[in-house]
Amino acid sequence: MSFTTNGFILIVDDTPTNLDVISETLSDAGFSVAIATSGEIALQRLERRLPDLILLDVMMPGIDGFETCQRLKSNPKTEDIPVIFMTALSDTDSKVQALELGAVDYITKPFQEKEVLARVKTHLQLRRLTQEMKYQVTEQKNAKEALQVSEELLRQKAILLEEMLCKLQHTQAQLIQNEKMSALGQLVAGVAHEINNPVNFIYGNITHADRYIQELIGLLKHYQQEYPQPTEKIQKYAQQIDYEFLKADLPKLLSSMMIGAERIQEIVLSLRTFSRLDEASMKAVDIHDGIESTLLIIQSRLKTQASIPIQVIKEYGNLPCVECYPGQLNQVFMNVLCNAIDALETEISQPNPTIHIQTKVIENNRIVITIADNGAGIPKSISQRIFDPFFSTKSVGKGTGLGLSISYQIIVEKHQGIFKCTSVPDKTVFWIEIPLKQEREKSSSTQ
C-alpha cells in the first residue's frame, strides 16, 4: 500500500478567485489538487477517486457545504475523509455547525497561506497514521509471527495517534469556545458602546438642567420679594401646581436622575471590563475588577429556581496588579461561577445557597482565587473527568462540556498556573493559582 507523497486534496468552492488562490498555494507546497465548483460535482468526483482531504466551502449553489458534509459522513466509503470547512471570518454560527457535523477543522477567508498549510498538513498526517494502522492490521491478521513482531510498532503508533486525537479534540474544543466567547465579547462591547453615548449625553446635561432650574427658582424668589402680593390668578395657579412642594422636590428629582445615570455608567464600565476586546495581549490588571464585572454580568442568575437568592460572600485580599490575559481570565471566572450557580439551582433543598469568593497572595509571588459553593458536590466517579473536553453531566442543550476544559487550558497552559477542584457533600471548591508575572516566552494570546 502506498500514499501520495504530500497528499491528494479536493477543493470545493464556487468562487473562481478562491479556487485559484488556494489551489496555487497547495500545488506550490507539493500537494496534488483537484477542484469542484459545487457539492454535486464534488460527490461525482469522489466516485472516481477518493482524496486524502477535502476543503469545503459553506455557501454554494445547489447543495451547500453542510449538506455535502452530511452526505460524506453518511457514506461508508467517504466517512473517514477529513473535511476542513472554509468560512468567512465573522461567520461564527457556520463554524460551530461545521464542527458539530463532523468537520475536523476550518480555515477563514481571506486565506492565510501559513495557516492553510499548517492545518492541511496536520490533518493529513493524522489520516496517514490511521490508514497505516488499518493496513498493518489487515496485512498481518493471518500471520501470527508477523503480528507479534509488529505489536510494538502498532502500540507506538496507537500512542501517537491517541496523543494527536487528544490534541485535535482540545483544539476543536478551544475553537468552538473561542468563537462563542468572541461573539459574546463583541456583543457586550457593542451594547456597552451603544448605551454609553446616550447616557453620557443625559449625565452631562443633568448638571446644566439643575443649574438652570436653580436659577429659575432664584428668579421666582426675586419676584416674590419685589411683588409680595401676587394677583389672585397667580395665587390660584401656584396652589394648583403645589408650588412649594414642586420647588422642594424638583432638586431631589434631579439628584435621583443623576444617581441613576451614574449607576448606568458603572454598568457600562463593568461590561467593558468583562469583554476587554482591546486587551488581548498580556498586561497588569486588578483581578478584583474582572471578578466584579463577571458578577455583574450574571447578576440575574443569582436567584435559584426556588426563588431563594444566592448569597455571594467576597473576601478579597490585598492583591497587587497581576500580569495576565484579562479577557481570558474573565472567561475562567464566568465558567466557574456559572457552574457554581448551576449546582445550586439543582439543590432546591439548600436553605442558604452561597458562593464564597476569596483572593490572596501566597509564597513565591503567586496569587490564589478560590470559588466555593455549598451545593451537593461532584461525585467521585466523575470528578476526574470534569476537565475533559466535551464531558458534561448536564442534559442535552444545557451544556457542551467545554467551559472547564477551556478554563484549564487558560490557567495551566496560558498562565503557567494551577487549576484544580476539590469536592465533598455541601462544598465544592475551585482553586485558581497563577504567578504575579508571566514568563513572556512561554505565553501567547489566542483570544
Image (cartoon, rainbow, N blue to C red):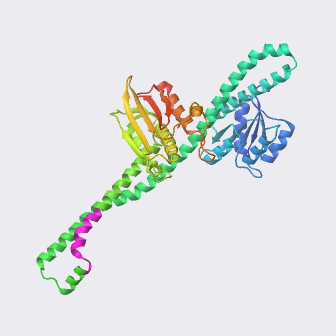
Q: State whether residue 266 appears in this view.
A: yes
> Percent position (x, y) of residue 418?
48, 28
Q: Magenta span has 245?
A: yes
Q: Residue at x 64, y 39 (%)?
A: 111
In-image side of 42 versus 200 (left or right): right
**Foreground: 427 or 386?**
427
Name above or below for residue 237 compared with residue 26: below
Give the residue displayed 49% in from the left and 24% down from the top.
Answer: 441
Q: Is residue 256 above or below residue 149?
A: below
Q: Locate residue 366 relative to residue 338 in the image: left or right.
A: left
Front position in the image: 38 or 95: 95
**Quadrant of the drawing holding the N terminus:** top right
Picture quadrant of residue 153: top right
Q: Which residues are magenta?
A: 240-254
- Residue 411 image offset from top left, x and y in percent: 49, 31
In terms of secondary structure, what is the magenta stretch mainly?
helix
Residue 203 shown in magenta: no
Residue drawn 35% across the image and 57% down it: 261
Residue 214: x, y in percent? 22, 66
